[in-house]
Each structure stands twice: as C-alpha cells, then as structure tokens.
Image (cartoon, grey):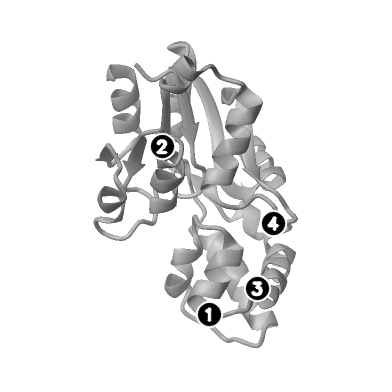
Amino acid sequence: MYQYIFFDLDGTLTDPREGITKSVQYALARMGIDEPDLKKLEPFIGPPLIDSFQEYYGFTPEQAKMGVSYYREYFKPTGLYLNELFEGVPKMLQSMKESGKVAAIASSKPEPFVRQILEHFQILSYFDYVCGSTLDETRTRKEEVIEELLRRMQLSESEKKKILMVGDRKHDVEGAGYFGIPCLGVRMGFAAEGELEAAGAIAVVDSMEEVEAFILQA
C-alpha cells in the first residue's frame, strides 16, 4: 500500500501551459530570438529550464542561465498566474488527506514559486512537504529534488517502500526510479505519445479520479 505520495506540479496537478510558454517566448525575445509559435515551446514544461534552453535552442550553459533569468522577469509577476488546476485536483487531495496519506510536492520549479502557486489555488494545506528546485540552479533535476525531499522526510527503509511518485513526464519516472520509487503517469500533462510507458511508469491514467482510485485501491 502506498502511504507517501510525491506529486509533480506542472502538467500533473496544474496546467501551466500559457504561463510557461509565454515566459519562454519573452526570454527568447530578450535573447534576440523571435518565436511566435507557443505550441513549439510546450516541451519546456516539466524539465529544468536551464536544460531545455540548451537542448531546444542550442544555448551555451552561460546563455541558458541568462535565459532563465529573463524567463523569471516575466514569470514572477505574470506567468505564474497564467495557470489553472486540472479538474478534480482538490477532491483528489481531500481524499488523500481523509485516507491518511502523506502528500508531498516534488517539482523542478523553484520552491518559492511552487508555494506561491499552491497558495494561489488554496491547496497548500493538503501537502505535508513541499520541495522544489533552487533559484541558484544548484538543485534542478528531478532526482536532486526527490533526494532533498527524502532528506527532509527522514523515512526509514521500510517506509521508503511505500512511496509513489505521480508525474506527467519521463523526468518524473526516471527521477523516481533513481531511488527505486515507482511512478504513476498522468496523460493530462505534456508527455509525448508513449513517453511515460517507455520511461517505465507502472501505469498511466487519464484523470484525477483515476489517480485517486489507483492510490486508494493499491
């Protein structure tokens, strides 16, 4: 039975499509790149931004850091709020709490932004732990975030066997798998067709109702 549920944020609990893609578009413009197609920027949702700027636009590490800085110029005052909860999230989280599950956030988004978003949607109280990346880029990868979350929780080896990760991208599956943690994939997010299955998700579901049913029936 799963007792400790680690949730990704972007693409798992929230749809941040507009806010993230417009923030990336703004950052690219500041770097002299005109990208009118927001759809093309959706792969930025989920992975660490510093990696995505390098992967998709060939930035050097130094340019990528500058891109992240420009991204935050738009994201902090505006992009953060161009976001919405997926249908059924509060109900699912309430069921987790009522059933005695320990819920945590493990996100590659900077932790201060994660907390702002959870407060904005009035769901922060459902989470016993909130862990995100660092603003100085010293903790960005999903396995680094999960490692820090595990450090904070101080679980015993037997308790660690009761952890389930819930995420929408291969980075969630692979980051959890680094610690032997199974991952439930959700299709509401931004994974390519077959991405979650190929990464090794133990199951893939299509709604918050299915997330809830999987966790409570496991």
Residue in the picture at 58% in, 68% down: 22
Q: Mark 1 = which residue?
A: 57
Q: Earlier in the sequence, mark 3 or mark 4?
A: 3
Label 2 sits on what residue type?
Val
Label 4 sits on what residue type?
Glu
Mark 2 to mark 3: distance in Å?
30 Å
Q: Mark 4 = which residue?
A: 137
Percent from the top left, x then y, of residue 189?
A: 39, 51
Percent from the top left, x then y, of residue 177?
A: 40, 40
SS assignment at label 3 = helix
Q: Which corner quadrant of the image does residue 27 belong to? A: bottom right
Residue in the picture at 56% in, 52% down: 141
Q: Is the C-beta separation of discs 4 and 1 under 8 Å?
A: no
- Along the line of sight, which residue is nearer the eye, 153 or 10? 153
Mark 2 to mark 1: distance in Å?
29 Å
The nearer-to-camera label among 2 and 4 is 4
Mark 3 to mark 4: distance in Å?
11 Å
- Along the line of sight, which residue is nearer the eye, 2 or 208? 2
Q: Earlier in the sequence, mark 2 or mark 1?
A: 1
Q: Mark 3 = which residue?
A: 61
Crowd class of label 4 (few under 14; some 14 to 19; many from 20; radius 10 Å): some
* 47 to the left or right of 73: left
Percent from the top left, x then y, of residue 94?
A: 47, 20
Q: Is residue 92 above or below residue 61?
A: above
Q: Which corner quadrant of the image does residue 186 belong to? A: top left
Residue 192 seen by the camera? yes
* 165 to the left or right of 202: right
Label 3 sits on what residue type?
Pro
Label 1 sits on what residue type?
Tyr
SS assignment at label 1 = helix
State the mark number for residue 166.
2
- Along the line of sight, which residue is nearer the eye, 149 or 6? 149
